[in-house]
Structures are given as structure tokens and as C-alpha cells.
Image (tube, helix red, strand yellow):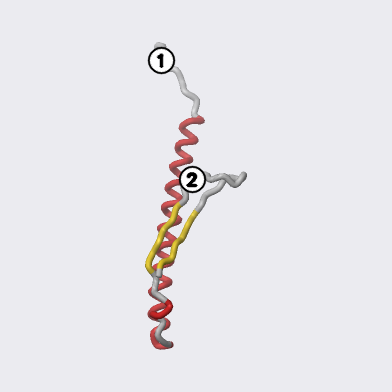
Amino acid sequence: MKLAITVNLKKADGSAATETTTIEVEVPDFEDFTGPERFGEVFDQYERTVLKARNEAIGAATEKYLSELVKKKATARPKTEKPGS
């Protein structure tokens, strides 16, 4: 079974601010929960995988956010003349 986490950064008007970030990971199937004695072990595996994927998704989305910020700031910065021009 796979779990997909998708992160979209949007502007106030609803348009995309950055490219969509999607992280997909394998998680235990429902059938892996074979009884009460295995529930804790299987759920722990599920939870650890999901938390790691969430952190990766947010990290990747943040990188895209900062990359866009740098682009916007670079184009908004006034260009100055070189000395002697």
C-alpha cells in the first residue's frame, strides 16, 4: 500500500506559488494487522514512515518556497550603474 503526501503552496488568489510537491511511501497493508499482538508493531512502522515522509514533503516544499523567494527578490532589486559608466 502507498501513502502520498502532496503539498501545494498557493497565493492569496488561489494560484500556484510553487510547483506541487508529492512524496510517496510504502506503508503496511491492512492485512499486516494480523491481530492485537502485532498491532503496536505494525502501527509503529506505519507512523514512523508517515512522519518521515511528512518531514521530507515539508522540507522539499520549503526549498521550493525559498527558491521562489530568491527569484522574486532578485528581480525586485534595483540595478545600479557601474562606476565609470
Question: Relative to the observer, which residue lies in front, 71 or 77?
Answer: 71
Nearest to the observer: residue 79 or residue 30 = 30
Q: Is residue 8 above or below residue 42?
A: above
The residue lying furthest to the right in this view is 13
Residue at image position (45%, 52%) is 21
Question: Against 3, is 70 above or below?
Answer: above
Quarter residue 41 falls in: bottom left
Dot 1 amino acid type: Pro
Amino acid at dot 2:
Thr
Is 50 drawn above or below residue 35 in the view shown?
A: above
Q: Say which quarter of the image contains residue 52.
A: bottom left
Residue of label 2: 18
x then y, percent, for residue 34: 40, 85
Give neighbour class at mark 1: few <14, some 14-19, many 20+ (Cα, 10 Å).
Answer: few
SS at mark 1 in the image: loop
Gap between marks 2 and 1, in whole Å?
Answer: 37 Å
At which x and y percent is residue 33? 41, 82
Quickly name the residue at label 1: 83
Q: Residues within 10 Å of mark 2 (few under 14, many from 20)?
A: some
At numbered mark 2, what does the secondary structure look like: helix, strand or loop? loop
Mark 2 vs 1, N-terminal side: 2
Q: Residue at x 49, y 45 (%)?
A: 18
Point out the image quarter for the N terminus: bottom left
Query: Who is closer to the viewer here, 3 or 72?
Result: 3
Location of residue 17 in the rendering, given as x and y in whole percent from the top left corner: 52, 44
* Residue 20, label in figure: none
